[in-house]
Image (tube, rainbow, N blue to C red):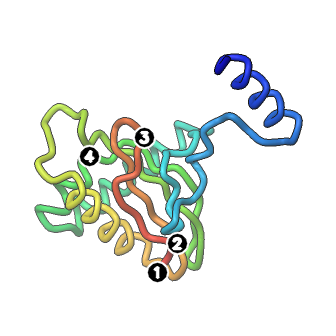
Amino acid sequence: MITPLLGIAATAALLTGCSLQDDSVGPGPTGVATKLPQDSNRAKSSKQAREFRSWVDKHGTGSQQKAAARVQRIIGDWDDKSGTAFISTDINGGPTPVKDPTSTAETIVKTFNAYIKPQQTRVSVYDVFGQVLTGNAGT
């Protein structure tokens, strides 16, 4: 009896415009997307990550350099006043384990904010599986 009811519920949801897909890429309660958005330009996101790591190598502390080394791609666009940066890392899946993933992600957010000197930029950091570790909804 349960199986026909599930079919009816799914049909009703589709007919009323509801989605059965996981919509968790949208912002969560803190304004931070819970899943890493699709990367439509991997060359650009990889280049942005290299530029960030290079800047951190020149201007960052040892702990900032260690955290930034985990950054694989930076998806998004921003300028000196606004935008969004989704930072993809190898945390929880890289060649060496991270003892405190949240602290490492928070270091990346703070370092990225110093890198771009934002006013309204949103920054989120994601683990190797695309799950959000931390982020801010704009400074």
Q: CA distance from mark 4 to mark 3?
A: 14 Å
Badge 1 amino acid = Thr
Q: Nearer the viewer, residue 109 or 28?
A: 28
The secondary element bearing badge 1 is classed as: loop
Q: CA distance from mark 1 to mark 2?
A: 7 Å
At 36% from the left and 57% from the top, the residue drawn is 52
For mark 2, what is the residue? Answer: 121
Which percent across, then down, holds residue 56? 26, 62
Question: In the rendered structure, which disc, 4 or 1, sits on the residue that comes first in sequence?
Answer: 4
For mark 3, what is the residue? Answer: 130
Q: CA distance from mark 3 to mark 2?
A: 20 Å
Callout 1 touching callout 2 (CB < 8 Å): yes
Question: In the rendered structure, which disc, 3 or 2, sits on the residue that comes first in sequence?
Answer: 2
For mark 1, what is the residue? Answer: 139
Q: Residues within 10 Å of mark 3 (few under 14, many from 20)?
A: some
Q: Nearer the viewer, residue 129 or 63?
A: 129
Q: Residues within 10 Å of mark 4 (few under 14, many from 20)?
A: many
For mark 4, what is the residue? Answer: 70
Q: Nearer the viewer, residue 76 or 126?
A: 126
Residue found at the very far front of the displayed protein: 1
Which percent across, then down, holds residue 60? 21, 67
Which quadrant does the N terminus fall into?
Answer: top right
Q: CA distance from mark 2 to mark 4?
A: 21 Å
Q: Is residue 80 above or below residue 61?
A: below
Badge 4 amino acid = Arg
The secondary element bearing badge 2 is classed as: strand
Which percent across, then down, holds residue 47? 46, 45
At 59% from the left and 74% from the top, the residue drawn is 82
Badge 3 amino acid = Gly
Which percent across, then down, holds residue 36? 49, 45
Task: Kindly report which numbered mark, 3 or 2, lies closer to the viewer in this rendering.
Answer: 3
At 28% from the left and 64% from the top, the residue drawn is 106
